[in-house]
Amino acid sequence: MSALLPSRRGPVAPERLSRTNISDSDRRRPSVRVWLGIGQTVVLAALLVAGLGPLVWLALAAVSPTQDLIRGPFSFFSSGVVQWENLAIAWERGRIGHYLTNTAILAAGSVVVTLVVSTTAAFVITVLRPRWGKILSGAILATLFIPSIVSLVPLYLTVRELPVVGVSLINTWWAVWLPAGATAFNVLIIARFLEAIPADLYEAARIDGAGPLRILWSIVLPLSRPILGVVGLLTVVASWKDYLWPLLVLPDPDKQPVSVALPRLADQTELSVQMAALFLSLLIPVALFLIFQRQFLRGASMAGGVKG
Protein backbone atom coordinates (compact mmCIF):
# COMPACT_ATOMS: atom_id res chain seq x y z
CA MET A 1 0.00 0.00 0.00
CA SER A 2 2.83 2.38 0.85
CA ALA A 3 4.49 1.64 -2.48
CA LEU A 4 1.50 3.03 -4.33
CA LEU A 5 1.59 6.35 -2.46
CA PRO A 6 3.86 9.12 -3.76
CA SER A 7 6.90 9.80 -1.62
CA ARG A 8 6.76 13.08 0.29
CA ARG A 9 10.54 13.32 0.40
CA GLY A 10 11.15 12.70 -3.25
CA PRO A 11 12.09 15.36 -5.80
CA VAL A 12 9.33 17.63 -6.97
CA ALA A 13 8.74 18.07 -10.67
CA PRO A 14 9.78 21.46 -12.11
CA GLU A 15 6.22 22.08 -13.35
CA ARG A 16 4.92 21.87 -9.77
CA LEU A 17 7.37 24.56 -8.60
CA SER A 18 6.06 27.06 -11.15
CA ARG A 19 3.93 29.75 -9.55
CA THR A 20 2.51 31.10 -12.81
CA ASN A 21 -0.26 29.94 -15.13
CA ILE A 22 2.33 29.06 -17.78
CA SER A 23 4.52 26.04 -17.07
CA ASP A 24 8.22 25.89 -17.82
CA SER A 25 7.67 23.47 -20.68
CA ASP A 26 5.27 25.92 -22.35
CA ARG A 27 7.72 28.77 -21.88
CA ARG A 28 10.29 26.90 -23.96
CA ARG A 29 8.02 27.01 -27.00
CA PRO A 30 8.99 29.86 -29.37
CA SER A 31 5.42 30.96 -30.05
CA VAL A 32 4.66 31.21 -26.32
CA ARG A 33 7.83 33.21 -25.67
CA VAL A 34 7.01 35.66 -28.45
CA TRP A 35 3.42 36.30 -27.38
CA LEU A 36 4.42 36.45 -23.71
CA GLY A 37 7.07 39.05 -24.48
CA ILE A 38 4.60 41.10 -26.53
CA GLY A 39 2.02 40.97 -23.74
CA GLN A 40 4.55 42.00 -21.10
CA THR A 41 5.77 44.86 -23.27
CA VAL A 42 2.24 46.14 -23.88
CA VAL A 43 1.35 45.99 -20.18
CA LEU A 44 4.59 47.74 -19.18
CA ALA A 45 4.04 50.46 -21.78
CA ALA A 46 0.46 51.00 -20.57
CA LEU A 47 1.65 51.30 -16.96
CA LEU A 48 4.34 53.80 -17.95
CA VAL A 49 1.86 55.92 -19.88
CA ALA A 50 -0.71 55.84 -17.08
CA GLY A 51 1.84 56.49 -14.32
CA LEU A 52 4.43 58.80 -15.86
CA GLY A 53 2.24 60.35 -18.56
CA PRO A 54 0.53 62.95 -16.32
CA LEU A 55 3.84 63.89 -14.67
CA VAL A 56 5.60 64.36 -18.01
CA TRP A 57 2.66 66.38 -19.35
CA LEU A 58 2.68 68.63 -16.29
CA ALA A 59 6.45 69.13 -16.54
CA LEU A 60 6.14 70.24 -20.17
CA ALA A 61 3.09 72.40 -19.47
CA ALA A 62 4.96 74.16 -16.66
CA VAL A 63 7.39 75.72 -19.16
CA SER A 64 4.91 76.25 -22.02
CA PRO A 65 3.22 79.56 -22.92
CA THR A 66 -0.42 79.99 -22.05
CA GLN A 67 -1.44 80.34 -25.69
CA ASP A 68 0.11 76.99 -26.56
CA LEU A 69 -1.81 75.30 -23.75
CA ILE A 70 -5.08 76.84 -24.89
CA ARG A 71 -4.64 76.07 -28.58
CA GLY A 72 -3.41 72.50 -28.21
CA PRO A 73 -2.92 71.05 -24.74
CA PHE A 74 -0.99 68.08 -26.17
CA SER A 75 0.99 69.91 -28.86
CA PHE A 76 3.74 71.34 -26.70
CA PHE A 77 5.97 74.21 -27.82
CA SER A 78 3.96 74.71 -31.02
CA SER A 79 5.19 78.30 -31.09
CA GLY A 80 8.78 77.24 -30.41
CA VAL A 81 8.92 79.17 -27.11
CA VAL A 82 9.98 77.66 -23.79
CA GLN A 83 9.11 79.87 -20.81
CA TRP A 84 11.44 78.84 -17.99
CA GLU A 85 10.43 81.99 -16.16
CA ASN A 86 7.07 80.39 -15.35
CA LEU A 87 8.77 78.48 -12.53
CA ALA A 88 10.32 81.65 -11.08
CA ILE A 89 7.02 83.54 -11.30
CA ALA A 90 5.14 80.72 -9.59
CA TRP A 91 7.78 80.56 -6.85
CA GLU A 92 7.84 84.30 -6.18
CA ARG A 93 4.42 85.70 -7.12
CA GLY A 94 2.52 82.54 -6.20
CA ARG A 95 4.57 82.13 -2.98
CA ILE A 96 4.86 78.41 -3.57
CA GLY A 97 7.93 78.26 -1.36
CA HIS A 98 6.02 79.79 1.55
CA TYR A 99 3.09 77.40 1.15
CA LEU A 100 5.40 74.41 0.83
CA THR A 101 7.02 75.45 4.11
CA ASN A 102 3.60 75.60 5.75
CA THR A 103 2.83 72.14 4.37
CA ALA A 104 6.11 70.77 5.73
CA ILE A 105 5.36 72.25 9.18
CA LEU A 106 1.88 70.72 9.20
CA ALA A 107 3.20 67.34 8.05
CA ALA A 108 6.04 67.30 10.61
CA GLY A 109 3.72 68.22 13.48
CA SER A 110 1.16 65.65 12.39
CA VAL A 111 3.84 62.95 12.32
CA VAL A 112 5.04 63.79 15.84
CA VAL A 113 1.53 63.89 17.31
CA THR A 114 0.50 60.71 15.47
CA LEU A 115 3.52 58.74 16.64
CA VAL A 116 3.14 59.87 20.25
CA VAL A 117 -0.60 59.16 20.47
CA SER A 118 -0.62 55.96 18.42
CA THR A 119 2.44 54.44 20.09
CA THR A 120 1.29 55.13 23.65
CA ALA A 121 -2.22 53.88 22.92
CA ALA A 122 -0.92 50.70 21.32
CA PHE A 123 1.53 50.24 24.22
CA VAL A 124 -1.26 50.49 26.78
CA ILE A 125 -3.50 48.04 24.91
CA THR A 126 -0.86 45.49 23.97
CA VAL A 127 1.81 45.61 26.69
CA LEU A 128 0.26 47.03 29.86
CA ARG A 129 -3.12 45.30 29.28
CA PRO A 130 -5.24 47.09 31.93
CA ARG A 131 -8.64 45.78 32.94
CA TRP A 132 -10.38 48.33 30.78
CA GLY A 133 -8.05 47.59 27.87
CA LYS A 134 -10.66 45.63 25.91
CA ILE A 135 -13.14 48.48 26.27
CA LEU A 136 -10.53 50.97 25.01
CA SER A 137 -9.57 48.68 22.13
CA GLY A 138 -13.22 48.23 21.16
CA ALA A 139 -13.86 51.98 21.29
CA ILE A 140 -10.85 52.66 19.07
CA LEU A 141 -11.93 49.94 16.64
CA ALA A 142 -15.48 51.34 16.52
CA THR A 143 -14.21 54.68 15.22
CA LEU A 144 -13.10 52.96 12.01
CA PHE A 145 -16.76 52.47 11.07
CA ILE A 146 -17.60 56.18 11.41
CA PRO A 147 -17.27 58.07 8.08
CA SER A 148 -14.90 61.00 8.32
CA ILE A 149 -17.48 63.40 6.89
CA VAL A 150 -19.86 62.54 9.76
CA SER A 151 -17.31 63.53 12.42
CA LEU A 152 -16.31 66.71 10.59
CA VAL A 153 -18.82 69.03 12.29
CA PRO A 154 -18.29 67.71 15.87
CA LEU A 155 -14.54 67.88 15.36
CA TYR A 156 -14.75 71.46 14.10
CA LEU A 157 -16.90 72.50 17.07
CA THR A 158 -14.40 70.86 19.41
CA VAL A 159 -11.45 72.66 17.84
CA ARG A 160 -13.30 75.98 17.81
CA GLU A 161 -13.83 75.75 21.59
CA LEU A 162 -12.00 73.05 23.50
CA PRO A 163 -14.09 71.43 26.25
CA VAL A 164 -13.28 72.48 29.84
CA VAL A 165 -10.48 74.79 28.73
CA GLY A 166 -12.62 76.90 26.42
CA VAL A 167 -9.66 77.84 24.17
CA SER A 168 -10.08 78.15 20.41
CA LEU A 169 -7.51 76.46 18.17
CA ILE A 170 -8.81 77.99 14.95
CA ASN A 171 -6.03 79.48 12.83
CA THR A 172 -3.30 77.64 14.76
CA TRP A 173 -1.12 74.68 13.81
CA TRP A 174 -2.61 72.65 16.65
CA ALA A 175 -5.98 72.62 14.89
CA VAL A 176 -4.38 70.36 12.25
CA TRP A 177 -1.86 68.52 14.41
CA LEU A 178 -4.14 67.25 17.18
CA PRO A 179 -6.89 65.66 15.01
CA ALA A 180 -4.18 63.92 12.96
CA GLY A 181 -3.09 61.97 16.05
CA ALA A 182 -6.54 60.49 16.69
CA THR A 183 -6.31 57.83 13.97
CA ALA A 184 -7.51 54.37 14.93
CA PHE A 185 -5.92 52.76 11.90
CA ASN A 186 -2.39 53.73 13.01
CA VAL A 187 -3.09 52.47 16.54
CA LEU A 188 -4.16 49.08 15.19
CA ILE A 189 -1.11 48.77 12.94
CA ILE A 190 1.32 49.50 15.78
CA ALA A 191 -0.63 47.27 18.19
CA ARG A 192 -0.41 44.33 15.80
CA PHE A 193 3.33 44.91 15.47
CA LEU A 194 3.80 45.02 19.25
CA GLU A 195 1.89 41.75 19.62
CA ALA A 196 4.63 40.03 17.60
CA ILE A 197 7.32 41.05 20.12
CA PRO A 198 7.98 38.19 22.57
CA ALA A 199 6.37 38.80 25.95
CA ASP A 200 9.46 37.39 27.66
CA LEU A 201 11.26 40.66 26.95
CA TYR A 202 8.67 42.61 28.91
CA GLU A 203 8.71 40.11 31.77
CA ALA A 204 12.50 40.18 31.97
CA ALA A 205 12.45 43.97 32.08
CA ARG A 206 9.85 43.95 34.86
CA ILE A 207 11.94 41.49 36.87
CA ASP A 208 14.93 43.82 36.54
CA GLY A 209 12.80 46.60 38.01
CA ALA A 210 11.93 48.51 34.82
CA GLY A 211 8.72 50.53 34.91
CA PRO A 212 6.29 51.15 32.06
CA LEU A 213 8.14 54.24 30.78
CA ARG A 214 11.45 52.40 30.86
CA ILE A 215 9.98 49.47 28.94
CA LEU A 216 8.48 51.84 26.38
CA TRP A 217 11.72 53.78 25.89
CA SER A 218 14.26 50.94 26.02
CA ILE A 219 12.38 48.01 24.46
CA VAL A 220 9.28 49.04 22.54
CA LEU A 221 10.58 52.08 20.68
CA PRO A 222 13.89 50.54 19.46
CA LEU A 223 12.14 47.39 18.24
CA SER A 224 9.29 49.33 16.64
CA ARG A 225 11.38 51.53 14.37
CA PRO A 226 10.22 49.81 11.14
CA ILE A 227 6.52 50.20 11.87
CA LEU A 228 6.99 53.72 13.22
CA GLY A 229 8.73 54.70 9.99
CA VAL A 230 5.85 53.27 7.95
CA VAL A 231 3.23 55.11 10.03
CA GLY A 232 5.24 58.32 9.77
CA LEU A 233 5.42 58.10 5.98
CA LEU A 234 1.71 57.35 5.68
CA THR A 235 0.98 60.34 7.91
CA VAL A 236 3.14 62.61 5.75
CA VAL A 237 1.27 61.54 2.62
CA ALA A 238 -2.13 62.03 4.26
CA SER A 239 -1.16 65.46 5.60
CA TRP A 240 0.35 66.58 2.30
CA LYS A 241 -2.78 65.89 0.28
CA ASP A 242 -5.35 67.01 2.88
CA TYR A 243 -7.49 69.88 1.65
CA LEU A 244 -10.84 70.22 3.40
CA TRP A 245 -9.73 70.27 7.04
CA PRO A 246 -6.92 72.86 6.65
CA LEU A 247 -9.34 74.98 4.61
CA LEU A 248 -11.81 75.02 7.53
CA VAL A 249 -9.46 75.58 10.48
CA LEU A 250 -6.83 77.80 8.81
CA PRO A 251 -8.66 80.81 7.34
CA ASP A 252 -5.48 82.91 7.35
CA PRO A 253 -3.82 82.55 3.90
CA ASP A 254 -0.35 82.93 5.43
CA LYS A 255 -0.81 79.67 7.37
CA GLN A 256 -2.49 77.57 4.69
CA PRO A 257 -0.71 74.62 3.02
CA VAL A 258 -0.07 74.36 -0.69
CA SER A 259 -3.14 72.14 -1.24
CA VAL A 260 -5.39 75.01 -0.13
CA ALA A 261 -3.36 77.76 -1.81
CA LEU A 262 -3.31 76.27 -5.31
CA PRO A 263 -7.06 76.67 -6.04
CA ARG A 264 -6.88 80.29 -4.90
CA LEU A 265 -3.82 80.82 -7.09
CA ALA A 266 -5.84 79.71 -10.12
CA ASP A 267 -7.99 82.84 -9.87
CA GLN A 268 -5.01 85.20 -9.69
CA THR A 269 -2.52 84.00 -12.31
CA GLU A 270 -2.51 82.78 -15.89
CA LEU A 271 -2.68 79.15 -16.93
CA SER A 272 1.03 78.60 -17.55
CA VAL A 273 1.95 79.89 -14.09
CA GLN A 274 -0.71 77.61 -12.57
CA MET A 275 0.87 74.60 -14.28
CA ALA A 276 4.29 75.67 -13.00
CA ALA A 277 2.93 75.98 -9.45
CA LEU A 278 1.38 72.49 -9.69
CA PHE A 279 4.65 71.07 -10.96
CA LEU A 280 6.65 72.63 -8.11
CA SER A 281 4.17 71.34 -5.53
CA LEU A 282 4.56 67.78 -6.89
CA LEU A 283 8.35 67.67 -6.78
CA ILE A 284 8.65 67.02 -3.05
CA PRO A 285 6.06 64.17 -2.84
CA VAL A 286 7.60 62.47 -5.88
CA ALA A 287 11.10 62.82 -4.39
CA LEU A 288 9.89 61.40 -1.07
CA PHE A 289 8.37 58.41 -2.84
CA LEU A 290 11.55 57.71 -4.82
CA ILE A 291 13.68 57.89 -1.66
CA PHE A 292 11.37 55.90 0.63
CA GLN A 293 9.66 53.64 -1.90
CA ARG A 294 10.43 50.47 0.09
CA GLN A 295 8.79 51.91 3.19
CA PHE A 296 5.76 53.03 1.16
CA LEU A 297 5.32 49.55 -0.31
CA ARG A 298 5.74 48.00 3.12
CA GLY A 299 3.13 50.37 4.52
CA ALA A 300 0.72 49.51 1.72
CA SER A 301 1.14 45.78 2.39
CA MET A 302 0.55 46.27 6.12
CA ALA A 303 -2.49 48.42 5.43
CA GLY A 304 -3.95 45.73 3.18
CA GLY A 305 -3.32 43.08 5.83
CA VAL A 306 -5.13 45.03 8.54
CA LYS A 307 -8.07 45.98 6.33
CA GLY A 308 -8.44 42.45 5.07
Image (spheres, grey):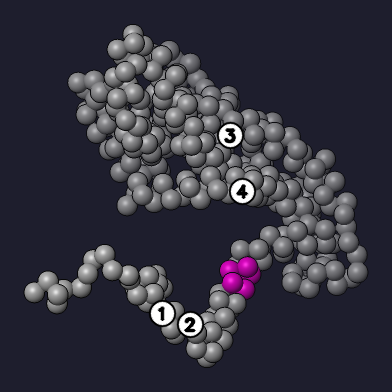
Do the numbered discs 2 and 1 sit on residues whose CB atoms are within 8 Å? yes
Q: Give the amino acid at mark 4.
A: Phe
Q: Quadrant of the N terminus?
A: bottom left
Picture quarter containing residue 249? top right
Which numbered mark, 3 or 2, is in the foreground of this view?
Answer: 2
Q: Give the amino acid at mark 1.
A: Ser
Identify the residue under disc 2: 27
Q: Give the amino acid at mark 3.
A: Ala
Q: CA distance from mark 3 to mark 1?
A: 48 Å
Which numbered mark, 3 or 1, is in the foreground of this view?
Answer: 1
The 10 Å Cα crowd at callout 2, few under 14, some 14 to 19, many 20 or more, is few
State the residue in front, 8 or 112.
Answer: 8
Do the numbered discs 3 and 1 sit on residues whose CB atoms are within 8 Å? no
Q: CA distance from mark 4 to mark 2?
A: 35 Å
Query: Which label belongs to residue 289?
Result: 4
Q: CA distance from mark 2 to mark 1?
A: 6 Å
Give the residues in magenta: 44-49
State the residue in front, 94 or 183.
Answer: 183
Identify the residue under disc 3: 107
Q: CA distance from mark 4 to mark 1?
A: 36 Å
